[in-house]
Image (cartoon, grey):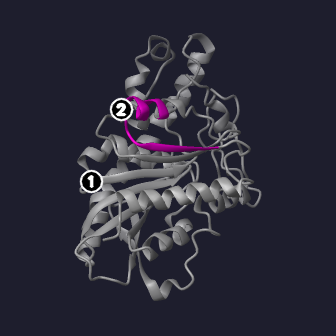
């Protein structure tokens, strides 16, 4: 098991404001997740690879349909980016979920990457989800993942209504969005409205494993930490006797991998101290079930994966290979 607390202790600023969210006595400081700031802008550039995902004239190749509702909360909105060509019998859907540490970010942040997917002939969707902030203190990774599960069938239905029947889909994201995408692909994929061709993403939490299951103060800290993420009360006793594992299962993508799971393309930074959750459980689960997967480790990089352009280009090449192999444009 791996210690996860440093991720919550990271603090990035935007215009001098600190989002003091996920406050945990467990960490002994205000737990501040990745905020929309210069650091998040750098992360966004890394995750969306703007130099490798350019669309020169979007209006000529595609159309944006913003802010379709999928529920009754303010955040329950999704955008569709569709190709101009409406002559095909079926289309592939690519869902991309935004980054932001579960506390910030918006589907509009990923307009360029969604345009890029649509320019290749796919229907692309960005989905907002209720973030954990002062207005929504009870939001959790579990509630966010449930919102994505609710949204996907409506995304598929709306695409069909617009004249784009969806045959299969891929789902991915960056950072927090990558974590939520993996939860959907492996936990909820069996009930998806169309088959999931593959999952993809960068630096998302595939597990929330900790080293602190020995009891005492460490167990209490971990219990509070996991309570916030899961949205359920977890006690120190549950940490020591192991019963917490079933409570956090809904937010750990690797726990749902089986022989029928979709392939996965993932990238992580070897020096990532913002999201230092263990990636080994997911890799091990994919290997144990013979699920095709590719994992890129950026050895010199942290959470933003900057400084290794060649590695990023290799990841993008592999993403194109996954699209051609598992979700070809017909």
Where is residue 185? Give x, y as percent. Answer: 36, 47
Where 14 falls versus 281 (above or below)? Answer: below
Residue under label 2 = 289
What is the number of callouts on the image? 2
Residue sitting nearer the eye, 138 or 148: 148
Where 267 falls versus 324 (above or below)? Answer: above
Q: Is residue 258 left or right of residue 219?
A: left
* Outermost bottom residue: 60
Residue sitting nearer the eye, 232 or 42: 42
Residue 128 visible within the image: no
Q: Secondary structure at mark 1?
A: loop
Q: Secondary structure at mark 2?
A: loop
Q: Residues within 10 Å of mark 2 (few under 14, many from 20)?
A: few
Residue under label 1 = 195
Residue 37 visible within the image: yes
Part of the protein shown in magenta: 283-297
Where is residue 131? Give x, y as percent. Answer: 50, 52
Q: Residues within 10 Å of mark 1 (few under 14, many from 20)?
A: some
> Given this view, does label 2 or label 1 mark the residue nearer the observer?
2
User: Within the magenta stretch, is there residue 286?
Assistant: yes
Q: Look at 66% across and 49% down and name the residue there.
A: 19
Q: Look at 70% across and 33% down and name the residue there.
A: 29
Where 266 falls versus 324 (above or below)? Answer: above
Where is residue 9? Give x, y as percent. Answer: 69, 37
User: Within the magenta stretch, is there residue 111?
Assistant: no
């Amino acid at each position: 098991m791996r210690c996860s607390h440093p991720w919550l202790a990271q603090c990035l600023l935007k215009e001098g404001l600190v989002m003091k969210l996920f406050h945990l006595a467990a960490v002994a400081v205000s737990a501040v997740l990745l905020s929309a700031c210069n650091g998040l802008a750098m992360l966004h550039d890394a995750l969306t690879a703007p130099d490798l995902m350019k669309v020169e004239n979007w209006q000529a190749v595609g159309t944006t349909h913003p802010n379709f509702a999928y529920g009754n909360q303010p955040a329950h909105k999704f955008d569709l980016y569709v190709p101009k060509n409406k002559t095909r019998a079926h289309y592939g859907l690519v869902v991309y979920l935004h980054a932001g540490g579960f506390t910030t970010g918006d589907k509009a942040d990923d307009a360029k990457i969604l345009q890029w997917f649509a320019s290749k002939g796919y229907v692309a969707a960005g989905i907002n989800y209720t973030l954990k902030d002062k207005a929504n203190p009870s939001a959790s990774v579990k509630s966010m993942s449930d919102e994505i599960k609710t949204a996907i069938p409506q995304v598929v239905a709306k695409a069909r209504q617009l004249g784009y029947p969806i045959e299969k889909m891929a789902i991915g994201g960056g950072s927090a969005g990558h974590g939520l995408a993996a939860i959907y692909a492996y936990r909820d994929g069996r009930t998806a409205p169309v088959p999931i061709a593959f999952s993809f993403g960068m630096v998302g939490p595939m597990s929330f494993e900790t080293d602190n299951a020995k009891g005492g103060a460490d167990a209490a800290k971990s219990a509070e930490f996991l309570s916030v993420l899961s949205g359920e009360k977890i006690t120190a006793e549950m940490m020591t006797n192991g019963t917490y594992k079933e409570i956090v299962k809904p937010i750990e993508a690797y726990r749902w991998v089986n022989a029928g799971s979709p392939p996965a393309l993932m990238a992580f930074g070897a020096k990532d101290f913002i999201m230092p959750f263990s990636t080994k459980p997911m890799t091990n689960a994919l290997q144990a079930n013979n699920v095709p997967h590719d994992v890129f480790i950026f050895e010199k990089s942290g959470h933003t994966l900057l400084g290794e352009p060649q590695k990023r280009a290799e990841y993008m090449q592999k993403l194109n290979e996954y699209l051609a192999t598992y979700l070809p444009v017909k």
